[in-house]
Amino acid sequence: MKTVATVRQIMKQIAPRIGLTPKKHLDWIVKLATDKEPQTPGDLMNQPLCIAVFIFLERREALRIEHDGKANVPSQGEAEEIVKEWKKIIRAVINHESILKPRIRHDRIDWREASERYVEACDLDDWTTLATRALVDLVLRYGNLVKICRAPALRGKKKKDICGKWFVADRPNQDHCSSTCRSRAATKAKRARDRKK
């Protein structure tokens, strides 16, 4: 558990790491789910706090400062379990498979005096369910943009060698993870057309 003064300070520190928009949150999770981008020891240490901030930003719950001044975050083991579940979900999204939306045991709505509105609330005893449900909600909105780059691999020996990087596209018709891959695919297509002439 991290010792911090306020939720605002946590947000200022962590929110830029995971992105400031829901689509950027999904991009952060896709990068976590790929084994091609290894995490530093500092990233692993901050992972529980990043997950708690993600849940807070997506579902407006879970992030609280306890009486002792520490943030209520998942344990390191819970964070590892969450990332494993996220990897399964992203793999299913890439393969266009069905995904089961996890159920929260005590789903309810509560009245909040500060906002004078009802808000969706649930019990915080299961971090994995909260994190997985938040990701599934993102997949409902942006799942069509999660793709695998099919550009030819850099110096690929076989025709089947592709880049293979998982990414979140900026628009539905984007097929490549970067301008480099887009250029590589266009060059390969042009050379194939020229050979046919």
Image: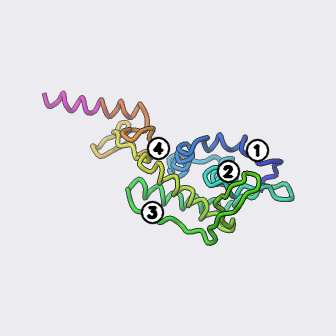
Q: Secondary structure at mark 1?
A: helix
Residue ID at (32%, 34%): 185
- What residue is pinned by disc 4? 168
Q: Amino acid under label 4?
A: Val
Q: Earlier in the sequence, mark 1 or mark 3?
A: 1
Q: Amino acid under label 1?
A: Arg
Label 4 Cα crowd, 10 Å radius (few <14 / some 14-19 / many 20+): many
- What residue is pinned by disc 1? 8
- What residue is pinned by disc 3? 99
Query: Is any atom of residue 105 visible in this view?
Result: yes
Looking at the image, which is closer to me, 65 or 189? 65
Q: Earlier in the sequence, mark 4 or mark 3?
A: 3
Label 2 Cα crowd, 10 Å radius (few <14 / some 14-19 / many 20+): many
Q: CA distance from mark 2 to mark 3?
A: 23 Å
Q: Secondary structure at mark 2?
A: helix
Q: CA distance from mark 4 to mark 1?
A: 28 Å
Q: Secondary structure at mark 3?
A: loop
Q: CA distance from mark 4 to mark 3?
A: 18 Å
Looking at the image, which is closer to me, 50 or 84? 50
Q: Earlier in the sequence, mark 2 or mark 3?
A: 2
